[in-house]
Amino acid sequence: MSADHQLTRLLFDWTNGDQTALSRLMPLLYAELRGMAESYLRGEPAGHTLQPTALVHEAYLRLVGQRLPDWKNRAHFFGVASQLMRQILVDRARLHHAAKRGGNARRVTLSDTISFADERGSDLLALDDALNALAAIDPRKCRVIELRFFGGLDIDETAQALNISPATVGRELRVAKAWLYREMRKE
């Protein structure tokens, strides 16, 4: 059985309540999830304190703490994981931005030392706003961006997850990137 088929089988078993499947699944997924987290955090300034391990652990807690979706395959799982990681990063940037502006929101985090640099957090918030605007007018283009850049999926995996051709993924990606660039320049 190929690694992708094994992952899909374990995801399916986990969805159906087999907790032993989860314990066999996590070692297989951890390295990829950590790689995704490292790629998200690669652009952070030198002084940031959010580590890939903390991001993976928080995403894991959110994944196992929710009602499980009906996992279709590996690409579907990583698509959901990428959305969670994006949301975690955006939530942290919003908290940091609010605190910087005098907000008194109580922080509940895995670590009291997790923070973001001001300019990177603002960029992330602007990107999130632009992605939300894109999702309002073209949800598929937004999903292509999420799966490719937040999920770390390649063109073929993105095509499989969205049930479209790789050529369509390429076209959607080019248009979405141009649209996001224009939106981000406005701000």
Image (tube, helix red, strand yellow):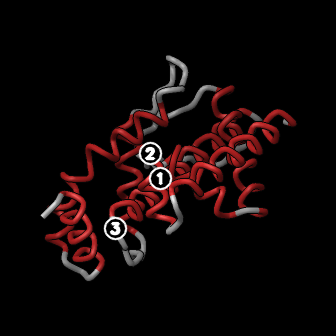
- Element type at marker 1? helix
- For image coordinates 81% across by 38% down, the residue present is 182
Quarter-wise, where is residue 9 in the image? bottom left
Q: Which residue is mark 3?
A: 73
Q: Residue at x 70, y 51 (%)?
A: 131
Q: Residue, x 65% and y 38% (percent of image)? A: 124
Circles 3 and 1, Cβ within 8 Å, touching? The answer is no
Q: Earlier in the sequence, mark 3 or mark 1?
A: 3
Instruction: Give how far across and how far down residue 183 sits, in percent.
Output: 81, 42
**Residue 152 numbered tag:** 2
Task: Give the amino acid at mark 3.
Answer: Asn
Q: Disc 2 vs disc 1: Cβ atoms closer than 8 Å? A: yes
Residue hosting label 1 = 82
Pick the front one: 175 or 116: 175
Q: Position of residue 8 (x, y in %)?
A: 26, 68
First-in-chain label (2 vs 1): 1
Image quadrant in which the C terminus is located = top right
The picture places residue 13, in percent across and down from the top left corner, at: 22, 77
Horizontally, residue 158 falls left or right of residue 95, namely left
Q: CA distance from mark 3 to mark 1?
A: 14 Å
Nearer to us of marks 3 and 1 is 3
- Residue 5 appears in which quarter of the rendering? bottom left
Q: Split into 4 quadrants, where in the image is the N terminus?
A: bottom left
